[in-house]
Image (cartoon, rainbow, N blue to C red):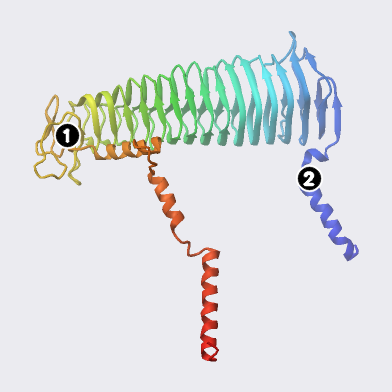
Amino acid sequence: MPVRSLPIFLAILVMGVITPYSESLAVNHISACTIIDEPGYYVLDSDLLVNKTKCIEIKSSNVVFDGGNHRMVAGPFGGTYGVFVYHEAGLRNITVKDTSFENWVYGVFLRDVEKTSVYDVKTKGGFFGIYFSNVENLVLRDSKVDDVKKIAFGLEGVYKAELYNLQAKNATENGILLLNSEGVSIHDSVVEESGFGFYLKNSKDIIVNKCKSAFNEKFGVYIYNSENVEVLGLQALENELDGIKIYSSENCRIYGSEFLGNRVGIFFEGTKESKVIDNTISNSENGIFLSNSRNNHITSNELSGNKKGIISTSSSYNLFNSNRISGGAAISFRDTFSSTITDNWIENAEKGIFLMGDSQRNLIYLNYIFAERNTYDEGKGNLWYSPDIKKGNYYSDYEGSDAYGDGIGDQDYLIPPKNVKDIYPLMNPLKMEKKEIEEEKEVLGEDAGGKETTTPLQSEQKMEESLVDFQSFEFLFGIAALIVIATLIVLLIRDRIL
């Protein structure tokens, strides 16, 4: 090959490598049910009314099935699989797109496939919408399933998958099911009016991000015997049971989510090493419930309008800190051991912090409690102050004095029914006052006299604007210019020109 032709040859070779396989496939037009056993791009040319068990059966790798936005309707004498993808030797590079299925047992079913893409698919009626078994490297997107008697989107034995922009409605059993799967990301998807919203079982390394699960008959999200599951930006609304229930699982994280009108907002049962951070839970029977769980962190959550805020039963070594709880029974322990309650704000509550049953060796300090009944402790060995920092809690009904002016009450605060003592009761809710002042400044933006006020964030921004950036181009250029001018002046003086 001439040297001059080598770059052209390489360019052609590279273009051939990076061109998607679908663009290089032969186009085949089909207008009836068929078996696809050769690679190619297959386009459906018309709607189909089908009285067969299988309509489109794919038995070859490197196949694109393009439904051309046509409908495939199962008739009264058939209708098991709309699209069936399987070969005993395994398949790879399969795409199914742009098709509507009605009344099939399975709208789309893929088994033992590597590198799969399914998108712009709609299914309605039947039992299963879109189902994957033993699939690796999957992308499922922009699809919708309605009115199925079992599962809308099912993933069983799936490894490495991205699911997004999915909609499931009226699925009797599960909206989105993950079973024995790993490395799956689900985002920007909605499940409504189904049995379970999202059901994750025996799975790990799962992310559920910016999804909505609402008006389901059971749980918004149910996580069973799984690990390393992260749920963030979830909206769990008006589910009949729990917004999210995590059972017999570990290392799960729930961040920045909204739970409204569920029986329980967040329920841990037999769960360990997990975190609940920065969520809002409101208008539920119970806000956050821990049962037989240990080594979990419940931090910086906002709970309001719940009959009970945070509940812990038969659990141990959990941390409850920096939560803000308004209304109802704020924090209730029963038969709970060696846990810590600290830095929580409790307002307008019927009950503050109650330790019941055989609750032992719990540490409670730096909490601010405003309730009709602030405290109760019928357990053993619970400590209502920190012996290290020598501070207890603030109680709205404390009537002691502070002769030394150190912010610690001179008289012990007695906690019924056993008169357990907080020997370092706090005199003033300083943290709460500071928080409320900052919130008022941010909301009002100006004072009562009509003058503009500045929030701490605005003050910081103005200070940053007023400071000189010693690394900016303008500053360095100015310094260089001054040096040049000074040098010229020195030279002029030396030569007696000035």
Q: Amino acid at mark 1?
A: Gly
Q: At numbered mark 1, what does the secondary structure look like: helix, strand or loop?
A: loop
Q: Amino acid at mark 2?
A: Thr
**Would you say 325 lies left or right of 418 here?**
right
Q: Residue at x 33, y 34 (%)?
A: 323
Examine the image and state in which quarter residue 366 appears.
Answer: top left
Q: Residues within 10 Å of mark 2 (few under 14, many from 20)?
A: few
Looking at the image, residue 149 lies above or below residue 374:
above
Q: Residue at x 55, y 89 (%)?
A: 497
* Quadrant that contains the N terminus: bottom right
List the residue tagged with mark 2.
19
Instruction: Measure the C-alpha gap from mark 1 to mark 2.
Output: 70 Å
Indicate which disc residue 381 carries. 1
Residue 239: x and y in percent read: 47, 19
Can residue 148 be seen in this snapshot? yes
Q: Considering depth in this image, is 462 or 15 the residue closer to the camera? A: 462
Q: At numbered mark 2, what does the secondary structure look like: helix, strand or loop?
A: loop
Q: Considering depth in this image, is 235 or 478 the residue closer to the camera? A: 478
Residue 386: x and y in percent read: 20, 42
